[in-house]
Image (cartoon, rainbow, N blue to C red):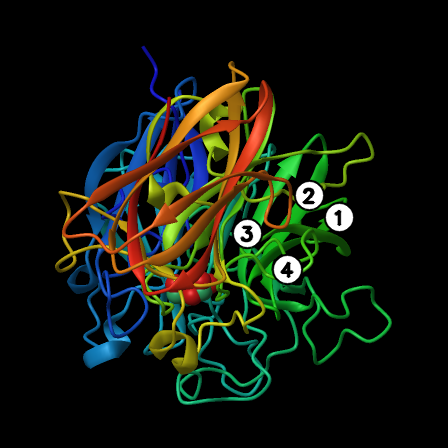
Amino acid sequence: MKQQAYNPYLPSYEYIPDAEPHIFGDRVYIYGSHDRFNGAFFCMNDYVCYSAPIDDLSSWRYEGVIWRKKDDPSRPPLILKQLYAPDVVQGNDGRFYLYYFKGSMGIIGVAVCDTPAGKYKFHGYVRYPNGTLLGRNHESDLAQFDPGVFRDDDGKIYLYTGFGEKKPNIFTRFRPVNYHGAMGVELENDMLTIKENTLTRIAKTQHCSQGTGYEGHEFFEASSMRKFEGKYYFIYSSVLGHELCYAIGDSPLGEFKYGGTLVSIGDVGLAKEPMNYLGNTHGSLIKIKDDYYVFYHRQTNRHCHSRQACAEKIIRNPDGTFSQAELTSCGLNGGPLKGEGKYPAYIACHLYKRGEPKFLTAKIAKGHHPYFTQTGKDREERGDQYVANFGDDCVLGFKYFDFAKDEVEVSLLLSGKPQGTLRIKDSPDGRELGTIALHPTSGKEAFHTNVAIGTGIKALYFDFVGSGRFDIFELEIQ
Ligand code: FUB
């Protein structure tokens, strides 16, 4: 029997941001960067891959390490070894090509493999027809970053990259300084050489957006291309960081018009205040069977180096536009979770302290803010992620459950020093369904009450009024 699928959809010890989903055969594969839990920088681990059958998106299989930092022949120093967001495309020779950004050199590396998730081998660097590497023309090149690759129905292969930085900083000083747009090129069949005269600017950055429709949501990073029903969708992370946006066009290098926001990791645009702590996000769109999904990453652990892969169903409208997807706990499940059973607290889709700034900053890291974390060090087993540091005016939300009974018992497993009242609601500021008096615990303790929830598809929210901080491990509905 199929299990239920949650957000994040991979094991809770897995920190994979920037995941690009692709269907090869009858499986969906994700290719992302690989954060180290509690790492000092982004992307400190080697690339790993996961895949799931397209008819069971709850069953993700670990495919192992597909590319290591040391597999690239150049040897950058220290942090410049990080492997940032990659992408994979199947070439016309049937092989699979992995594109990654060589941060230290500002260039794009390519590795190749006979299967979607085997051990990739170094293939070369993307270059102009005269042999100059893309990104090494410091005067004329656009800044390179986050390669996205796309194979059109006619077999032509395209590469998209770019960075919308305002001005050079310590991390960009090795790269070209032209931040005036994302760019696209067509590649030759060798998957490395740029076809003569195909370099085109795609989405607008803050440097060139006035009067274009991109204002306020200009391109920043995370280029990705998809095609649905003859329309081309350029997906990117905007200057706001916390959202994925799209631009729409009629050809792979054609003019792209701003389309809208696909998802925000704080539901900004849908909610009256950010419903999570915000940092960057990156991902893409995919159609799996009859449904469209947006893949993205969330932030955990009070800083931006422990990001996790999530996905939501998204509506493509008859006119080809997409409506912004809301954050849920049940993204790939195909519908709400059962309104009974035990659920880990880390599948909450909203977690924040009311009325406080929600950008991940040093203040958040030190302050009295709730967050997702795990015990111990980065590892590839024994996930035990939980909600830490919950307290007065903090909010924890799960969406959605399908309740079959009018009345259910709701129980939270927690530990810590709460002294006050936990309120159960159907939305962050909605109807109060019940309350539970909390007291300090010695170890983990379950607190429960009956609530008249009513049958149907509902959200469950918890907030706390009182003193003391506590950790939350599990939600149980009976
Ligand atoms: O994961 C490292 C960087 O953060 C990616 O390359 C960007 O797109 C952002 O997600």
Label 3 to label 1, Cα distance in Å?
13 Å
Tell me: residue 456, above or below residue 7: above
> Residue at (53%, 46%) from the top-left corner?
284
Could you classify mark 2 by the number of other residues whose Cα lies within 10 Å: few (under 14), some (14-19), or many (20 or more)?
many
Q: Specify which label sits upstream in the sequence, 3 or 4.
A: 4
First-in-chain label (2 vs 3)? 3
299 left or right, relative to 434: left
Q: Is disc 3 placed on a helix, strand or loop?
A: strand
Residue 177 location (% of width, % of height): 54, 86
Residue drawn at point x = 59 percent, y = 38 percent: 426
The front one of 14 and 427 is: 427
Mark 2, residue position: 232
Q: Quadrant of the N terminus?
A: top left
Residue 144 at what x, y percent from top left? Answer: 49, 71
Q: Residue at the location (76% across, 41% down)?
A: 321
Dot 1 or dot 4: first in sequence order is 4
First reached walking from the N terminus: tag 3 or tag 1: 3
Gap in angstroms between the C-alphas marked 1 and 2 = 5 Å
Local crowd size for mark 4, using a 10 Å CA cut-off: few (<14), some (14–19), many (≥20): some
Please tell me how crowded label 3 is: few (under 14), some (14-19), or many (20+) other residues with Cα within 10 Å: many
* C-beta proximity under 8 Å, tags 2 and 4: no
Which mark sits nearer the N-terminus, 1 or 2? 2
Q: Nearer the viewer, mark 3 or mark 4?
A: 3
Ligand 1 is found in which quarter of the picture? Answer: bottom left
| Image disc number at residue 224 | 3
Q: Could you say where residue 311 lies in the image, as x and y percent from the top left?
A: 48, 40
Cα distance, mark 1 to mark 4?
A: 16 Å
- In depth, the one of 220 and 4 nearer the eye is 4
Instruction: Answer left or right for 338 relative to 1.
Output: right
Judge by depth and name the residue closer to the eye, 267 or 55. 267
The answer to whether the residue bearing label 2 lies less than 8 angstroms from the nearest atom of ligand 1 is: no
Does the CB distance between marks 1 and 2 fall below 8 Å?
Answer: yes
